[in-house]
Image (cartoon, rainbow, N blue to C red):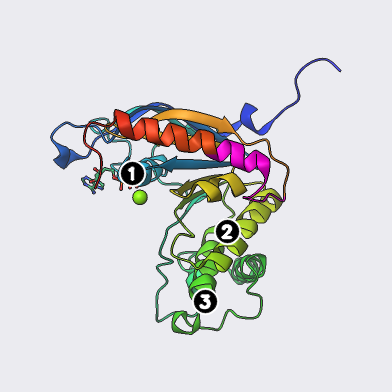
Amino acid sequence: MTGTTATAVDTPVVQAQGLGFRYAQALGEAVFSDVSLSVGQREIVCLLGGSGCGKSTLLRVLARLEAPADAAHTTGELHFMGAPHLRPHPRAALVFQQPALLPWLNAERNVGFGLDFAHQSAITRSALRQRVDEALAAVGLQGQGRLFPAQLSGGMAQRVALARALVREPVLLLADEPFSALDAITRAEMQQLLVDLVHRWQTAALLVTHDIDEALLVGDRIVLMGARPGRIVREWRVDIARPRRADSPEAGALRLQILGALHAARQADPTPSP
Ligand SMILES: Nc1ncnc2c1ncn2[C@@H]1O[C@H](COP(=O)(O)OP(=O)(O)O)[C@@H](O)[C@H]1O
Ligand SMILES: [Mg+2]
């Protein structure tokens, strides 16, 4: 067969070209610069890097949460679904390390928060309610929407946070160390859930992590970020069949390469973080 097969990478959901950012207070020092990065449909890209190298800032800039389209602080180009990405978009959803649920709302109301039920027609309201139920079912919490945050385990709370992102039918999921506060078994379950959801919902996902094994288990690509200024120093495609095991020889070989690159990046950093 001739020609090229359309792959996820051919049509990026989000694409950054030469992206740079500085905080207004930071006296001109860039947090990151010249970052070029894309994530395609049904693709999971893991952003790996030491503490303080700018991963969270990059994620917020990709979501346009930092100084939206403020040319004084952001340089380079950012596209979302093929169009210039200038302000936060409801279909680019974020998940953070802490689930940040509203304690006075039950799980289903937390998931539906912000969907604006009050100003919708009865038909739209019932469709939105169905979306909330579907999102809860997708994260394995069907029938548990009446529970309040205080009644949820850490893993369940993070599932609710994931459902709150899914209910927006995201084409892009931006997740900032979403599983790092969970115990090892729950973390492994959530990593598998993320892979399943991305494949089933055809979402593009950018997962920030400082855990090499997490990146090896879930990533289609791993992007390594160095510090001061934050920049992309290496990238690997993870061609390991799923389901993956962190103790497989392929994962072991790639882990060594990544560890070597992490050490090299740290050595190149003139002021290592404590
Ligand atoms: N709101 C802010 N204002 C000014 N500087 C910030 C702010 N948030 C983070 N920084 C700085 O930006 C750099 C990168 O931080 P961050 O993006 O949180 O890194 P990471 O997520 O990789 O640990 C750090 O030096 C941090 O102190
Ligand atoms: Mg961070």
Residue bearing mark 3? 107
Q: Residues within 10 Å of mark 3 (few under 14, many from 20)?
A: many
Q: Residues within 10 Å of mark 1 (few under 14, many from 20)?
A: many
Q: Mark 1 or mark 2, which has the lower sequence index?
A: 1
Q: Give the vertical position of 224 relative to 189 (above or below).
A: above
Mark 1 or 2, closer to the camera: 1
Query: In the shown orientation, is residue 235 left or right of residue 269?
Result: right
Q: Nearer the viewer, residue 126 or 249?
A: 249
Q: Mark 3 or mark 2, which has the lower sequence index?
A: 3
Secondary structure of the residue carrying tag 1 is helix
Q: Position of residue 3 (x, y in %)?
A: 78, 16
Residue beneath the point at 51% across and 30% down: 235
- Label 2 near ligand 2 (CB < 8 Å): no
Confirm whether the magenta stretch covers residue 67. Answer: no
Q: Which mark is residue 166?
A: 2
Which residues, given as a range, are shown in magenta? 243-255
Mark 1 or 3, closer to the camera: 1
Under mark 3, the amino acid is: Ala
Q: Which mark is residue 121?
A: none
Q: Position of residue 151 (x, y in %)?
A: 49, 84
Q: Nearer the viewer, residue 83 or 180?
A: 180
Q: CA distance from mark 1 to mark 3?
A: 28 Å
Q: Is residue 50 visible?
A: yes
Residue beneath the point at 47% across and 28% down: 234
